[in-house]
Amino acid sequence: MQNRSLKPTMVLQLEVNNHPGVMSHICSLFARRAYNLEAIACVPIGCGETSCIWLQVDEADRLEQVVKQIEKLPDVRDVRRQPGEHPVFAGLHDFV
């Protein structure tokens, strides 16, 4: 997949509790800080009590503070950083 943004990106992989409002809380945290999400993907894990969310974001200096705030959200179980060219987004641009 070619990164369509000129800025370097990374992917945040979140494991979260799967219930209404979780995605909204995470996205609003970015929106309140005027931080753009380049791409979002989400799938339930196992029996559906948890989900995996992938967020492709710019590698800005202020990202670390946003990640710390995400980690404090009660429904976020785990946050991992991945390279920006993550395979979960590899085929999505074919649909655009």
Image (cartoon, helix red, strand yellow):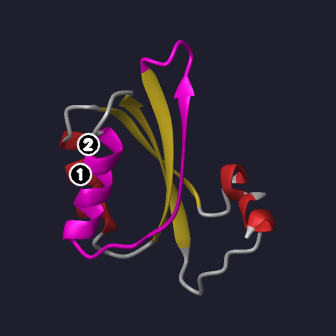
Q: Residue at x 53, y 12 (%)?
A: 47
Q: Quadrant of residue 96?
A: bottom right
Query: Which quadrant would the N terminus be assigned to in this image?
Result: bottom right
* Residue extending farthest bottom: 6
In depth, the one of 3 and 32 nearer the eye is: 32
Residue beneath label 1, please?
A: 68
Q: Is residue 7 left or right of residue 21?
A: right
Q: Residues within 10 Å of mark 2 (few under 14, many from 20)?
A: some
Q: What amino acid is found at the position of numbered circle 1 in the picture? A: Lys
68 shown above or below 62: above
Q: Position of residue 21 (x, y in %)?
A: 28, 39
93 shown above or below 72: below
Q: Residue at x 59, y 82 (%)?
A: 5
Bounds of the magenta segment: 22-49
Q: Quadrant of residue 6?
A: bottom right
Residue beneath label 2, please?
A: 71
Q: Residues within 10 Å of mark 1 (few under 14, many from 20)?
A: few
Q: Position of residue 27 (x, y in %)?
A: 32, 56
Q: Is residue 17 left or right of residue 87?
A: left
Answer whether residue 23 is magenta in the image.
yes
In depth, the one of 50 and 85 nearer the eye is: 50
Asked if the residues shown at circle 2 and circle 1 are in contact, with their CB atoms under 8 angstroms apart, the answer is yes
